[in-house]
Amino acid sequence: YLARMIAYAGQLEGEAERVRAAGAMGVRLPDFALAQCLKQLEIARSGPAEQWGIVTSIAKRTASMPGDYAVKAAKIATDRIAPALAAQIAALEAQRALTTSDAGVWKLPQGDAYYAWALQAATTTTMSPDEVHAMGRDELARLHARMDVILKAEGYSQGSVGARMTALGKDPLYLFAEGDPGRAEIMAYLRDKLKDIRSRMPQAFETLVPGFVEVTRISPAAEPGAPGAYGGAGSIDGKEPGRFWINLGNTSRWTRYSLPDLAYHEAIPGHAWQGEYTFKQPLIRTLMSFNAYSEGWGLYAEQLADELGVYDDFPAGRLGYLQSLAFRACRMVVDTGIHAKRWTRDEGIAFFVTENGSNPIEVRSEVERYCTWPGQACGYKLGHTRINQLRDKAKAALGARYDFRKFNDAVVLGGNVPMTVLEGVIDRHIAARKT
């Protein structure tokens, strides 16, 4: 642990040097992202070093052990980590006067070529920014057509789909209380949804995994700059559970119709569930990850939950699921809009709010993420669409021999792969089922 603390200081020092080198080439964060980064770094180094979590954690766990580990950890934090944090803050502060509000990488040296590469890396396809942008708009229109039918049946018939979803999001029936009471409600609600979906997994898979996952709040100190949620599998030995991390800094960002879908994406049968299948693969396969597959599976997991009937008695929940898919279609439009079509950050936020009725609180951190991680957000819906195209291919090729559970097994047992490789996986599944 102490050695890794020292290594952490080295990483911070190296990152400060990278910031300086990149800045010399004209590669800098947008001003709003730089301000957010500095805010988080200041939080990280606030207070005496001996009271930092990185020190108190080892102090608690070694309290009954000889070796003065708490003292040693405090010294490393004071002598190495604190100066390294200060150096990184200084490197970023030096760039503050040179930054602009331009959100896209088009502004950087060779920015257009870099974005084309980042998009291909994130989607594991050769689609151009214009193609991804058009696909996002087409997917959004298709999903909104489905949402329109449900909204009308629920009594929301006036205005655009986005406007009606905004109105639905204000319905007290679907809101949680403010503050700690609401946080407790959300945690209990999510645990209940995961208990239910876990019981349905035998209907979707022949090969089952434990689904060992816990719902955990993101650290309040990290919540201001953190995403709404994220999740993943636990340890290979089964001792540590997977985590479904949820941002509860502001309970108003969540609704009862949107949270179930989030649980299915991040936990079961999403990231935590899919990750457990890799435990049976060679170690390197547990470490490799391809964005379009990972996030495409997350959306396909949401679809599986719908197909397993979780929303049959909860139409608003199905709206939340479809809005989630539409949200990912919006990502394709906004990410390419910002980086290839020179949209501003505010234009990206407005597109989400206006077109999809998304919560402005959630959307702001989302769009700021795209500004600093170009291309990544496009992998979600593109990967999801590709998995469904391959499922349709399997259905057409196999006819009566197509098996829902066996197809899902093929996708997860084949491991995390590029979309081009996944097609080969499904082709072999089809060939094996035909014999």
Image (cartoon, rainbow, N blue to C red):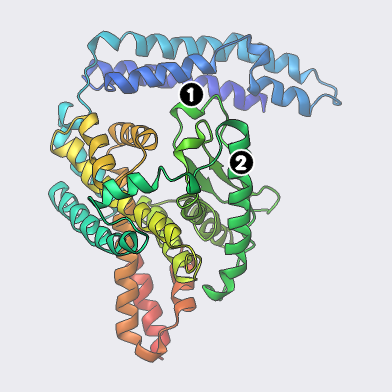
Q: Nearer the viewer, mark 2 or mark 1?
A: 2
Position of 63 relative to 349 (above/below): above
Considering the image in quadrants, where does the C terminus appear? bottom left
| SS class, disc 1 | helix
Q: Between residue 379 and residue 427, name the one nearer to us.
A: 379
Numbered label attached to residue 11: 1
Q: Amino acid at mark 2?
A: Thr
Numbered label attached to residue 432: none
The answer to whether residue 48 of the structure is visible from this angle is yes
Position of 87 relative to 121 (above/below): above
Position of 424 relative to 274 (above/below): below
**Left or right relative to 124: residue 273:** right
Name the residue at 56% across, 34% down: 218
* Image location (x, y in percent) of residue 60: 77, 25
Q: Residues within 10 Å of mark 2 (few under 14, many from 20)?
A: some
| SS class, disc 2 | strand
Name the residue at 45% across, 82% down: 403
**Left or right relative to 111: residue 366:** right
Which is more N-terminal, label 1 or label 2?
A: 1
The image quadrant of residue 55 is top right
Residue that numbered label 2 is attached to: 216
Instruction: Work out how far the residue at label 2 is from the one at label 1, CA to CA, in angstroms.
Output: 27 Å
The image quadrant of residue 29 is top left
Position of 191 relative to 306 (above/below): above
Q: Amino acid at mark 1?
A: Gln
* Image location (x, y in percent) of residue 142: 23, 62
The answer to whether residue 113 of the structure is visible from this angle is no
Q: Between residue 338 and residue 262, name the one nearer to us.
A: 262
For the image, the number of numbered tags is 2
Considering the image in quadrants, where does the N terminus appear? top right
**Left or right relative to 419: residue 333:** left
Q: Between residue 65 and residue 197, name the one nearer to us.
A: 197
